Amino acid sequence: MSLKLWQFIAIILAALTAGMGFRHLMDLPARIMWDQSRWLENIVTGGHNRMFGTVGASIVVATCVVMPYLAYRLRHHDRAASRLTAVSAACFILALTLWWAFVVPVNIEMDNWIAGPFPANWMSWRVQWEVMHALTTLIQMIGLGALLKSVVEGAQERLAELSAVS
């Protein structure tokens, strides 16, 4: 596959990944005000986030695989694009790592609440879940920006080279 096709695939995956996070970010102001029953129903039992755990997870993992591969492939063709793509890959991998470290424990804890009572400190769990989703989204947005910059700057350089030749 050509580098252009890999860049296109990486942009689509990065945009989808960041878009899922952005959806969480846009819902945060409303969700942070909900009482415990409404929050749990919408986050866990209501099925509103069901696709995030299946389709969404596949997209995030694919993003974290394609980005480093693209950075590696670009290293001999465009070092600046390779570096920016590596920064992008690092951002998406960092976001996924933070998600595993700070969101997954909340998800596991919330599974206990479905059948039993809410713990007294449920709001601290909610804050951790919401804040970490927001933080990972911001990191993903930086990653998407770095990827787009790598593609745009590479295209500008190629256009300048073509203009110089003609």
Image (cartoon, helix red, strand yellow):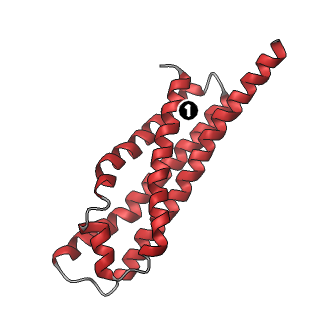
Give x and y (percent) for residue 4: 56, 24
The residue nearer to you, when weighing 107 against 46, is 46
Helix, strand or loop at label 1? It is helix
Residue 160 pos. (x, y %): 79, 23
* Left or right: 27, with 155 as reference point: left
Image point 50% across, 35% down: which residue? 10
Q: Is residue 109 above or below residue 70?
A: below
Q: Is residue 89 left or right of residue 109?
A: right
User: Residue 130, how many percent across, how many down?
Assistant: 44, 69
Say which quarter of the image contains residue 128: bottom left
Q: In this picture, is 151 found above or below 3?
A: below
Residue at 21 percent across and 83 percent down: it is 117
Q: Where does label 1 land, which residue?
A: 71
Q: Is residue 5 above or below residue 144?
A: above
Amino acid type, residue under disc 1 in the picture: Ala
**Residue lying furthest left:** 115
Relative vertical location of residue 67 with respect to residue 162 in this rendering, above or below: below
Question: Which residue sits at x=81%, y=18%?
Answer: 163
